[in-house]
């Protein structure tokens, strides 16, 4: 019987890289960041770029506290790997306000006291901005009647539609009524789908 020796592969001795230098475009600014391939976008934002407005809640994509906008769409940043974002546009709560004015959704949350402890508020506001943009694009929700093609605009959203669209963001403080009122105010003030996105 002939025993074969294993084929030697010189590359097999080298460990696979576990870290990469990536480009992140966050709130309109470009950044380069060395990250472990397993780093979530949430951790890259908070630990790598010191953008601590985005909160870590459950870290399992269930509470919505870490919601940010990726190319204008809302995502749970705890479930998104930083290396997969590439040079796409990330918007966090820090990137919503203008130089001298709050974003209309931020102002509406302030006007209606749409928060209690405030821990979930950044995620709630980013989610509301994304939800209003989705409604402006005519995306239906689970409470949109089956024969309805979807809302004509965010301004047409009912309280039930807003509750459903915000249902991925949990708050244990009992401020849901005020959050709905804040989103309704922001939706009513929209002129076009681009003014709040």
Image (cartoon, grey):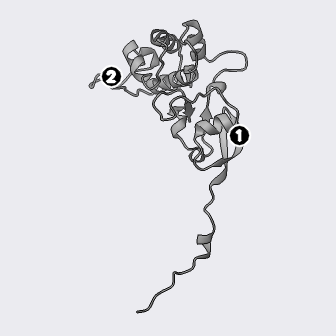
Spot occupied by residue 197 in the image (x, y as percentages of width and height): 56, 26
Q: Nearer the viewer, residue 186 or 160?
A: 160
**Residue under numbered circle 1:** 30
Residue 2 shown left or right of residue 99 in the figure: left
Pick the quarter of the image with the N terminus.
bottom left
Q: Earlier in the sequence, mark 2 or mark 1?
A: 1
The single residue placed furthest to the left in the displayed view is 147
Residue 191 shown left or right of residue 98 in the figure: left
Spot occupied by residue 90 in the image (x, y as percentages of width and height): 61, 35
**Residue under numbered circle 2:** 144
Please say if 104 is above or below 126. above
Residue 107 shown left or right of residue 61 in the figure: right
Give the CA distance from mark 2 to mark 1.
39 Å
Residue 131 shown left or right of residue 146 in the figure: right
Please say if 44 is above or below 143. below
* Circle number at residue 18: none
Q: Quadrant of residue 94?
A: top right
Q: Are marks 2 and 1 in contact (CB under 8 Å)?
A: no
Spot occupied by residue 54 in the image (x, y as percentages of width and height): 60, 28
Q: Secondary structure at mark 2?
A: loop
| Local crowd size for mark 2, using a 10 Å CA cut-off: few (<14), some (14–19), many (≥20) | some
Q: Residue at x 51, y 84 (%)?
A: 5
């Amino acid at each position: 019987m002939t025993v074969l020796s294993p084929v030697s592969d010189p590359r097999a001795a080298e460990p696979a890289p576990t870290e990469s230098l990536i480009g992140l475009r966050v709130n309109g600014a470009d950044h380069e960041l060395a990250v472990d391939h397993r780093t979530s976008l949430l951790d890259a934002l908070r630990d790598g770029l010191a953008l601590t407005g985005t909160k870590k809640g459950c870290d399992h994509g269930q509470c919505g506290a870490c919601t940010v906008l990726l190319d204008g769409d809302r995502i749970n940043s705890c479930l998104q790997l930083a290396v997969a974002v590439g040079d796409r546009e990330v918007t966090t709560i820090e990137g919503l306000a203008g130089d001298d004015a709050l974003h209309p959704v931020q102002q509406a949350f302030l006007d209606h006291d749409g928060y209690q402890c405030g821990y979930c508020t950044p995620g709630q506001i980013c989610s509301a901005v994304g939800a209003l943009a989705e409604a402006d694009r005519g995306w239906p929700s689970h409470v949109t009647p089956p024969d309805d093609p979807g809302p004509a605009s965010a301004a047409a959203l009912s309280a039930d539609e807003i509750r459903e669209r915000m249902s991925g963001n949990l708050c244990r403080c009992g401020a849901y009524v005020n959050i709905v009122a804040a989103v309704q105010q922001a939706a009513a003030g929209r002129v076009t789908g681009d003014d709040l996105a």
